[in-house]
């Protein structure tokens, strides 16, 4: 289950413990997503409209602690909503940048090690994971990865706080 | 521009008219999306959380009139919102099905002729097109198209009004 997966990732050397939660051991879409994220070795670039799922935040924190270079872009209006994990991630030392516009930064994608693109309709919220119809596409075709990586770099620079304008 | 594109699609034989709108003739993301949709010859399967963009609705209506088999799945809560194009499309004779759940039908994809998948973060709303950061991925790889086509058929059957349950 997802709890066992995160526990194992947090302490890779520790002996396997029985799953601490009462859920059946199913290969859920969430655990498959977490597994893809945990495969990161060097970098994780996140561009997420809304991020409130605690398990996904724990996975991102684990990677940061493991030395993976994590960068996160998010939406200014949604980052302050109840349940948002953005504050916790910033507190953990992860670099976060956000827009300054009234329109939404509505992307929902992740790039692992500049080689694997994870994108789709899914916002990283518990509501979306538990209740909605969603899709998540995982692709490693260089052509697609490059288009999203380029967009990430463009946004990352545009949202650099050093260039904020104060009206 | 988008107006000229739709006018030409509505009357393919008519002589080219000057663009009726004052916008510059730029190849916008919206006009590229409309062009992809208008390439449909046999079928268009739409699975859209929110659909309020009038230009996209006109493109879909044109295809329906041209004899393309259009099926549309949408979200029950969002289909009734102000500006929604769903009523207009139903009125035009297009088959629409929706969920009956409290969770969202949050997909935003289209499949043209069972061969081209158009998917991403973009809801088909004017707000999203004009103001947001969004992505739209167009892929023709059979593997990806099949996964989304299968999901579409599953949802289409599940939302068949003949099997609605009344509590």
Image (spheres, coloured by chain):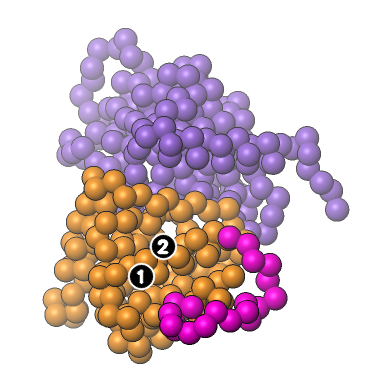
Chain colours: A orange, B purple
Please state the horizontal and vertical placement of residue B90, each as a whole percent of the image.
60, 33
Residue A157 vs residue B131: left or right? left
Q: Residues within 10 Å of mark 1 (few under 14, many from 20)?
A: many
| Identity of the residue furthest to the bottom in this view | A91
Residue picked out by circle 2: A36
Which label number is shown at residue B95? Answer: none
Please state the horizontal and vertical placement of residue A7, each as a whole percent of the image.
51, 80
Q: Is residue A23 magenta?
A: yes
Is residue B71 or residue B14 the one in the foreground? B71
| CA gap, disc 2 and disc 1 | 23 Å
Segment tinted magenta in the rendering:
A8-27
SS at mark 2 in the image: helix
Residue picked out by circle 1: A75
Q: Is residue B96 magenta?
A: no
Residue A78 vs residue B104: left or right? left
Q: Residue at x 41, y 44 (%)?
A: B119
Look at the magenta stretch and give its main secondary structure.
loop
Q: Residues within 10 Å of mark 2 (few under 14, many from 20)?
A: some
Q: Is residue B114 above or below residue A105?
A: above
Q: Tell me the chain of label 2.
A: A
Q: Residue at x 19, y 63 (%)?
A: A153
Is residue B153 or residue B66 the one in the foreground? B153
Please state the horizontal and vertical placement of residue A39, each as a whole percent of the image.
37, 66
């Amino acid at each position: 289950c997802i709890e066992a997966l995160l526990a194992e990732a947090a302490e890779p050397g520790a002996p396997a413990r029985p799953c601490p939660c009462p859920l059946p051991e199913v290969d859920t879409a969430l655990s498959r997503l977490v597994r893809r994220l945990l495969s990161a070795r060097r970098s994780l670039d996140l561009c997420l409209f809304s991020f409130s799922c605690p398990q996904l935040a724990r996975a991102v924190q684990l990677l940061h602690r493991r030395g993976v270079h994590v960068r996160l872009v998010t939406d200014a209006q949604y980052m302050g909503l109840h349940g948002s994990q953005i504050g916790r991630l910033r507190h953990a030392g992860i670099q976060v940048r956000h827009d300054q516009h009234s329109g939404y930064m509505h992307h929902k994608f992740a790039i692992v090690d500049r080689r694997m693109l994870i994108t789709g309709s899914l916002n990283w919220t518990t509501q979306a994971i538990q209740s909605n119809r969603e899709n998540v596409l995982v692709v490693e075709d260089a052509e697609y990865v490059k288009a999203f990586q380029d967009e990430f770099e463009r946004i990352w620079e545009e949202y650099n706080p050093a260039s904020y304008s104060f009206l």
